[in-house]
Amino acid sequence: MTKTDFSQLDSQISSYRQQFPALKNKTYFNYGGQGPMPQASLNIIVEAQNQIQQQGPFGMIVNEWIKKEIAATKEVIASEIGIQTNTLTLTENVTAGCNIAMWGIEWHTGDHILLSDCEHPGIIAMAQEICHRFNVEMTTCPLMETLNGGDPVAVISQNLRPRTRLLVLSHILWNTGQVLPLDEIVQLCHSQQEQVKVLVDAAQSVGMLPLNLTTSEVDFYAFTGHKWLCGPGGVGGLYVRTESRDNLRPTFVGWRSITTDSHAQPTGWQSDGERYEVATSHYPLYTGLREAIAIHQQWGKPEERYQQICSKSEYLWSKLANLSNIECLCSSPPESGLISFQVKTGKSGASNQLVTYLESKGFLLRTILDPDCVRACVHYFTLKSEIDELVVEIQNFLNS
């Protein structure tokens, strides 16, 4: 994208950004950690909570309102990620969704779980505890080394075993920003003699990538609304493919997950994604997430938003690549909004020192421990001027 294109786009985005209070007093590059909420989401959450308190908060009117809010939220999310509403479970976050999927499998001694070597510590800990309780084996496959060359599908294929029951990996690797070829990976796993299920940690992909999960045939896809969708913390979801539902037992059980008879006694599980939901949630947050998604949709389609993310990500990557003592992990323009880079000053703790320095100047980034690097995140509404100012401050740090 040319400078002229950026200038024209930024003039349009500047007014759009006024909807996000958190962008007014800082320069934000932490969308992969938590996105800033639009003011409309904040307002509607308060309005919903007020309505609940005025009407009840527990009564027939409020209960009907809650049912409608749940249904409306599922419709919006399903449309955004390309699924049917009956395959969607509302959760609190990615971690809750991954727990549902990983613990819901009926594990047997000698079964095998395969993880990539770029998974979040929470996922690794889940797999370790499953191994401990059920005498299951866990190994990792080296996907980090495929960032700048190599075939992730081939690497996964080489690490599958006859007893592999589940592959767990991220659609976008949270530490390097690499986008994995999900459709090909799913096809590989499902083609094994004993079909391997695929669970995706979608923390970085929902809200960034244009998605059609139904056509991907992925088994489980756990995501959150508080990162790239810029919704409130505490609302996420789990997609469970229809063909995989019958073999996934509920991990958490509550009144939302069960059916009952006329005496309110449990008779079975809900027939759709609700079987993995538990009990009372903070329903006003659902309204906040819907509002955030609506604001994104006002700006453009998922494909258009992703194109802008990649364009601005490439711009930042090219600027960083020209700095001495800075080395981007990707040797070519990234395919996501995550740009990870290393500080090559020879000083111990340089990554932490840079992030601390930048925050003192009003620029919010974060460090990653493995590999040791700094991660910057750009959204479609990140300004070119913000990128330019960030690079100047990094250069100032390097010169200090």
Image: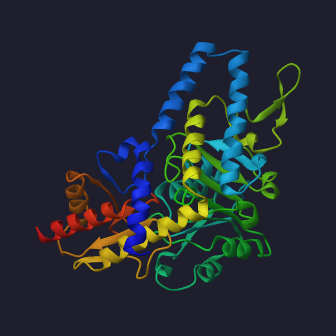
Residue that extends furthest to the left in the rendered view of this protein:
400
313 above or below 79? below
At 39% across and 58% down in the image, what residue appears? 11
Residue 255 in the figure: left or right of residue 205:
right
161 above or below 136? below
Name the image colouring. Answer: rainbow
Query: Residue 381, how many percent across, how many down?
Result: 44, 57
Residue 393 in the figure: left or right of residue 306:
left
At 27% across and 63% down in the image, what residue appears? 390
Residue that extends furthest to the right in the rendered view of this protein:
262
Q: Nearer the viewer, residue 228 or 182?
A: 228
Query: Residue 2, how many percent across, how many down?
Result: 41, 75
Residue 261 seen in render: yes
Quarter of the image with the C terminus is bottom left
Residue 173 seen in render: no
Q: Quadrant of residue 257?
A: top right
Quarter of the image with the N terminus is bottom left
Residue 263 in the figure: left or right of residue 370:
right
> How many labels sit on residues?
0
Residue 379 in the figure: left or right of residue 202:
left
Query: Residue 153, how many percent across, how many down?
Result: 63, 79
Q: Quadrant of residue 378?
A: bottom left
139 above or below 97? below
Q: Nearer the viewer, residue 249 or 242?
A: 242
At 44% across and 62% down in the image, what residue appears? 9
At 60% across and 36% down in the image, what residue appears? 286
Query: Residue 274, how many percent across, how many down?
Result: 74, 40
